[in-house]
Structures are given as structure tokens and as C-alpha cells.
Image (spheres, rainbow, N blue to C red):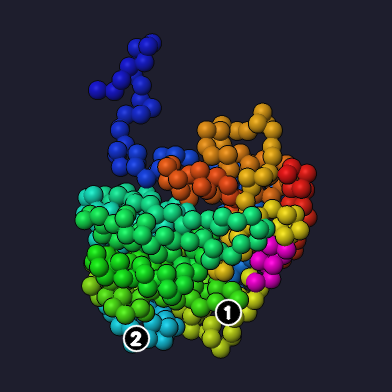
Amino acid sequence: MAPKTNSGIVDRSNLIPFSSRLKEGKALAQDVWSIFAAANLPADCINLGQGYMNFAPPEWVTKAAEEALHSVAPNHYSHPRGRIRLREAIKSFYGPQLNRDLDVESEILVTSGANEGQYSVFTAFLEQGDEVIMFEPFFDQYLPSVTFNGGKPVYVPLHPPTDSKIKSSSNEWTLDIAELRRAITPRTKMIIVNTPHNPVGKVFTKQELEAIASLAEEFNLLVMADEVYDCLVFDGKEHVRIANLPGMWDRTVTVGSAGKAFAATGWRIGWLIGPASIIQPTLAASTRIVFCSNSPLQEAAATGLEQAKERKFFENQLSEYAERRKVLCDAFDEIGLKYTLPEGSYFVLLDISEVKFPEDYPFPKSVLGRGRDFRACWFIAVELGVSSIPVSEFYCDEHANIGEAYARFAFCKDVDTLKKAVERLRRLKEYM
Ligand SMILES: Cc1ncc(COP(=O)(O)O)c(C=O)c1O
């Protein structure tokens, strides 16, 4: 029976209790993206917070989307594996990089963004209580995706650079392999390896990946290689795919995203590549979760992959991103705050532990009671007009103090916007 209020009136505001599942994985906590959403910040605040572009996808790709919308078949259900044209395009694009003749029927699955693909892998492989290792800081969506599927997240931190120089490389965020080994228990089922890494920008070296691979072999772990930023690796650094290391194909699922590749994060098109033994159970899960992904935009993503090489699209896009990275990082050099130069992805971590702000500043409730970085990022957004994301959100509560020192700035914005942001950020000097 519905509870009665003091006045005897039946309270109908909360008749049906929601699932306790939502109490796990920080699903009920207000997420950082909503707190730092543009609507909560001053109207002219420049958004370097959430990682989406302020420019359109390439015109030749959006034209393909329009054409698909104006024809019949691509407006209807796709095969749950994905439209064959996109699967063929994925095969041609990734096959040579994975040194395999990929089977479009059993080794490729198109998903509704990388997120849904990853969720479906968890659904397909996790038993209640199975442990999933993730490196901190981690992409926050992993956490509820694991817990909703009965998994238990286990955290292994990447250790930040310890010296006091202004510019560190993302490669100085290090993984302690002995610590990783200690985190493995008889319940460990899976390990997530995100390279290039969000939010650190780290591109794992072959040596690091070999060490992870050898533990995966020793303890029979499934490896989720989240490589959604694979087209953004700077300075000629090699992007090593863990699936290519000896013996690793059979236990690795590689994750990709059209959103990152073609500046189209709202399309919700992603893909998984791996052996049939991983893709087939994941297909069974994905089919019952979304049935199939957005059809017309699969055609557009296919066009993107088909034509990328002849148009030198990824080479050109990378040099544009390198210029964007330079605008932001040159400013941090000049301001004199410590930061991490990313070798990959489109994020820069700025050490904000030296940024001072009045403790009695009128902060909203949403940032009070969270890490110091939430207040620092809020202060910078409101006083300087540039938003960023507090990095403690990407850590478990126990290790949140490591993340509290950093704000994440996304440079997936046009150069003019970044230059305007940098002008504003110069005022950080007043608060050091
Ligand atoms: C590391 C990482 N993995 C996965 C995703 C999700 O990608 P998608 O937008 O294709 O779902 C993101 C998006 O920010 C990400 O940063």
C-alpha cells in the first residue's frame, strides 16, 4: 500500500521502488557531465569540458548520411550484426592493421556507439561477482556498465608523474605491473585496456601491453581493448593493438567508434572486432538490448571508412588536432601550471592544485561535498569562462584524492575557440 503523509493524504510521488541495481556504480550520483553542462554555466562560458566537437563531421560523410536517408533500405532495421556495407568497410580498414582477413559474419559487430558494444560484452561475459580490472583514471561509463551486469570493478591506478616540471608526457603516467598482478583474484574475468587513454592521453607502449598480455594469458582474462581514439596518436608514436600481440587475438575484443573518428559523437555508431568466440555471445546480448543500430548513419560511417585513405582524412584530421593541442599546451607552458602533454586522444590534464579560490565562493550544492577539483573547475568556469571536467570523477572514492589535483580540458574544438579560451585561461596567473 502507498505510504500516507502526515496529513493522511496518500503519497503517490514514489509508488514503485526502483531497482537496487541503480544504487551501484554511482548511477544515482549526479554525473559530472550534468553538473558541468552548458545550461548550468554562464551563457558565454567556452566548453572545453565534455569531449564532443564544436565542428561538423566532414561534408562528404554527412552527404552520405543524407543519401542514406533518402533511400529505402537504410531507413529500416539493419541486421543485428550491422549493415553489411559497414562491416565490409571495417574489414578493409582494420583487417590490415590486425594482420587478419576478418570474417564479416562472425568477427565484426556494429554497435550503438562504443558504449553499447562494451555494455553488451559485459552482459555476454560477466557472471554475478566477476571482477573487472580498470586502470584509474577510467572512462566513467565503464563503472555502471560493469555493475549493472553483476560485475565488480577493481581499480588499479596509473601513477601520475612525480617531478615538478611544467610539462610531463602522458607516458609518465605509469602502470605498476606488480600492483596489477596483486589486483588479480580467482574471480577476475576481464581487464579493460584503454589506449589512447581518456583522460590521461597515454598511449600504452608495446612493453606495457606485453606485460598486461602476459598476465591475461597467465590468468585467462578477457581483454577489452578500448581503442576509440586510435586515429588520434601524435608525434609519430606507434599505436600498438594488444590484439596483435602473440596469442592475444583469441582473448581480445577491440572497440572502435565512428563518433571519435568522424566528429560525430551523436550518431551512436561503434564497432567491436574480435574472435567469433567473443563476438557471437556479444551479438546475442546486443540483439536483445538494441536489436540493431542506427541504419542510415551506418551507411555514412561506411563511406567514411571506405574513402578515408584516398582522401588522407585521418592524416589531415590528426594534424588539425596536433595544432589544437599546441594552442592549449603552449598556453599552459606560458601560464606555468603543470600539465600532461597527451600522446593521444584529445584531452589535456592540467594540475590545478596550485589554483587558489575563496572557500566561501558561492558554489552550487552539486559541487559541494565532492573533490576540491569540482570546486576549482566550477570557479574557473564561472570566473574565467572556460569549463573543464574534474578528474576525481574518473577514480573510485578510495583513490579520488589522486584525481583531485587535475582538471581535464578537451581540445576537440576549432582553433579560434581554443585561442579565445586560452586568452581567458591566462588569467589563471591571478589565482596561483
Ligand atoms: C575511452 C572511451 N571509450 C568509449 C567511449 C564511448 O564512445 P561512443 O561515443 O562511441 O559510445 C568514450 C567516449 O567518450 C571514451 O572516451
Residue toward you, 401 or 152: 401
Q: Nearer the viewer, mark 2 or mark 1?
A: 1
Q: Is mark 1 within 8 Å of ligand 1?
A: no
User: Is residue 431 magenta-colored?
Assistant: no
Name the kind of residue labelled 1 in the image. Gly
- Examine the rendering and report whether any part of residue 287 can be seen: no
Q: 124 left or right of 39? A: left
* Rendered image quadrant of residue 340: bottom right
Residue 326: say if magenta: yes
Query: In the image, what residue type sits under mark 2?
Result: Arg
Is residue 337 visible in the rendered image? The answer is yes
Image point (29%, 57%), residue name = 184
Residue at x 35%, y 25% (from the top left corner): 12
What is the span of residues highlighted in magenta in the rendered image?
322-330
The residue that disc 1 covers is 236
Q: Quadrant of the C terminus?
A: top right
Residue 18 location (% of width, % of height)? 31, 37
Q: Nearer the viewer, residue 77 or 222?
A: 222
Instruction: Tell whether circle 2 marks a residue whose Cβ is less than 8 angstroms from ligand 1.
Output: no
Q: CA distance from mark 2 to mark 1?
A: 24 Å
Which residue is labeled 2 in the image? Answer: 100
Left/right of residue 373 with respect to residue 130 in the rendered view: right
Say which label, 2 or 1, has the lower sequence index.
2
